[in-house]
Structures are given as structure tokens and as C-alpha cells.
Image (cartoon, rainbow, N blue to C red):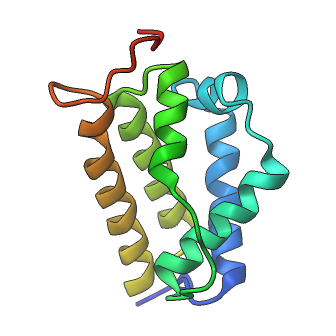
């Protein structure tokens, strides 16, 4: 029996992303990357993330236009992103989904996050990773 709602509305995306990023900001493993290295402007970043996840989960083709991998490569040039960072990001995202939602769209959200993490991880860490000359290893 389903006791939590599924992700069906933009408001659901906002709740998920707000919950997730509150965890990220306070996380001992990746919080410093967002707070100190990237110095994220949350008022700008959160609406971009709402649009990105609306694009992925609600099939809103007009919601997001961007190049997320490039932004992360630029960040990686300042501070090496490692597999452990992506693993922690995924764990926080999936736990946020599980706390708030259940159903096919919630499972899709967790799968999409997993796919992003696993696709991006080797680009940043491992034998085939992009290693900028000035990266802070």
C-alpha cells in the first residue's frame, strides 16, 4: 500500500530539491564543495535544479537548457571531484526521494540520479578522467 505521494507536480520537484540540498549544504563529505569551493548562489542554483529535474521527471522539455557537465568540469579544475563525492551525492539524493515519495516517478528519480552519478564518475575520477593541469589534487 502506497503511503507517500509520487512525484507528479513541479511543487513535488521543489520539495525534493529543497530537501536534498539542505542535506548537501550540511554534509561532512560534500558540503564544503558546494559551500566553500563552488560558493553556490542558492537563489540562482535552486531554480536551475528545479528546471533540470522537471525536464527529467515531468517531461517538461522547455524547463531546462544548459550544459551541466561543463559546469562540473569547471569546478573540477578548481577542486578534484572524486568517486566518493558522486557516491555521497547519490546517497543523499536517493534518501531524500525515499523520505518524501514513493511510486514509479520516485523510482525513476532515483534511477536518473544513479545514471547521472555512474556516467559522470569516470569523467572525473579513474584512469580515463579529465585531469586539468591546475587541478588541486
Please give the name of the residue rendered at 57% of the width and 63% of the height, measured from the top-left corner.
66
Please give the name of the residue rendered at 62% of the width and 66% of the height, measured from the top-left corner.
16
Q: In which quarter of the image is residue 130?
A: top left
Q: Which residue lies furthest to the front in this view?
A: 133
| 27 up-or-down from 36: above or below | below
Which x, y percent locates residue 133? Answer: 39, 13
Which x, y percent locates residue 8? Answer: 57, 89
Q: In which quarter of the image is the N terminus?
A: bottom left
Q: Is residue 11 left or right of residue 124?
A: right
Q: Is residue 25 left or right of residue 55?
A: right
Q: Can residue 132 be seen in this view?
A: yes
Comparing 68 with 111, the one in front is: 68
Please give the name of the residue rendered at 42% of the width and 32% of the height, measured from the top-left corner.
85
Q: In which quarter of the image is residue 81?
A: top left
| 47 up-or-down from 120: above or below | below
Q: Is residue 77 left or right of residue 40?
A: left
Which x, y percent locates residue 9? Answer: 64, 88
Comparing 30 with 96, the one in front is: 30
| 101 up-or-down from 132: above or below | below
Q: Can residue 103 be seen in this view?
A: no
Amino acid at each position: 500500500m502506497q503511503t507517500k505521494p509520487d512525484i507528479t507536480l513541479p511543487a513535488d520537484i521543489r520539495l525534493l530539491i529543497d530537501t536534498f540540498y539542505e542535506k548537501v549544504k550540511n554534509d561532512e563529505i560534500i558540503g564544503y564543495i558546494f559551500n566553500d569551493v563552488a560558493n553556490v548562489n542558492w537563489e540562482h542554483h535552486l531554480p536551475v535544479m528545479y528546471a533540470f529535474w522537471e525536464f527529467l521527471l515531468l517531461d517538461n522539455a522547455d524547463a531546462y537548457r544548459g550544459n551541466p557537465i561543463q559546469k562540473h568540469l569547471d569546478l573540477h579544475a578548481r577542486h578534484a571531484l572524486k568517486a566518493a563525492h558522486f557516491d555521497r551525492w547519490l546517497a543523499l539524493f536517493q534518501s531524500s526521494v525515499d523520505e518524501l515519495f514513493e511510486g514509479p516517478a520516485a523510482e525513476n528519480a532515483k534511477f536518473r540520479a544513479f545514471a547521472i552519478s555512474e556516467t559522470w564518475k569516470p569523467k572525473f575520477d579513474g584512469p580515463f578522467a579529465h585531469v586539468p593541469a591546475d587541478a588541486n589534487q
